[in-house]
Amino acid sequence: MVRTGQYTYVLYSWGKYREQLFHLPTDPGEMTNLAVEARYASVLEDHRQLLSRWLAETDDLYESHYAHPGAIPPVPGQSYDR
């Protein structure tokens, strides 16, 4: 999960809506997933990159935290070939 000034971005390891993006000023209860809306594609990509950088900086491999590593798709833009 990444939270910026206006958005919360959440990435789940599986599910129909693995990615969720919420606009906090207009949706403080985080009820409307903007990740599925094309007009938020650039905001979504920015938040993907923020999460990807954080994972790299903290050496957090993400998929190693789950019971079935390798079965979980990586964060878009993130590679685990370290």
Image: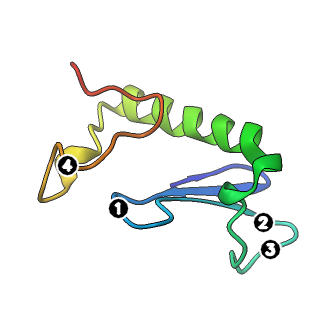
Instruction: Say few, some or many: other residues with alpha carbon within 10 Å of mark 3 (under 14 / 14 to 19 / 20 or more).
Output: few
Q: Which mark is residue 24?
A: 2
**Element under label 4?**
loop
**Mark 3 and mark 4: span between their CA atoms?**
32 Å
**Circle 1 sits on which residue?**
14
Asked if 80 appears above or below 13 in the picture, the reply is above
**Circle 4 sits on which residue?**
71
Q: Looking at the image, which residue sits at the far right?
A: 26
For discs 2 and 1, the disc positioned in front in the rendered view:
1
Disc on the earlier residue, 2 or 4: 2
Location of residue 4 in the rendering, given as x and y in whole percent from the top left corner: 70, 49
Q: Quadrant of the C terminus?
A: top left
**Element under label 3?**
loop
Instruction: Determine contact: label 2, label 1, CB under 8 Å.
Output: no
Location of residue 28 in the rendering, given as x and y in whole percent from the top left corner: 77, 75
**Circle 3 sits on which residue?**
27
Disc on the earlier residue, 1 or 4: 1
Q: Quadrant of residue 27?
A: bottom right
**Mark 2 and mark 3: span between their CA atoms?**
5 Å
Who's the residue at 57% across and 32% down the image? 49
For discs 2 and 4, the disc positioned in front in the rendered view:
4
Who's the residue at 49% across and 29% down the image? 53
Disc on the earlier residue, 1 or 3: 1
69 left or right, relative to 39: left
Residue kind at label 1, given as amino acid type: Trp
| Residue toward you, 32 or 61 | 32
Instruction: Say few, some or many: other residues with alpha carbon within 10 Å of mark 4 (under 14 / 14 to 19 / 20 or more).
Output: few
Instruction: Determine contact: label 2, label 4, CB under 8 Å.
Output: no
Residue kind at label 3, given as amino acid type: Asp
**Mark 2 and mark 4: span between their CA atoms?**
32 Å
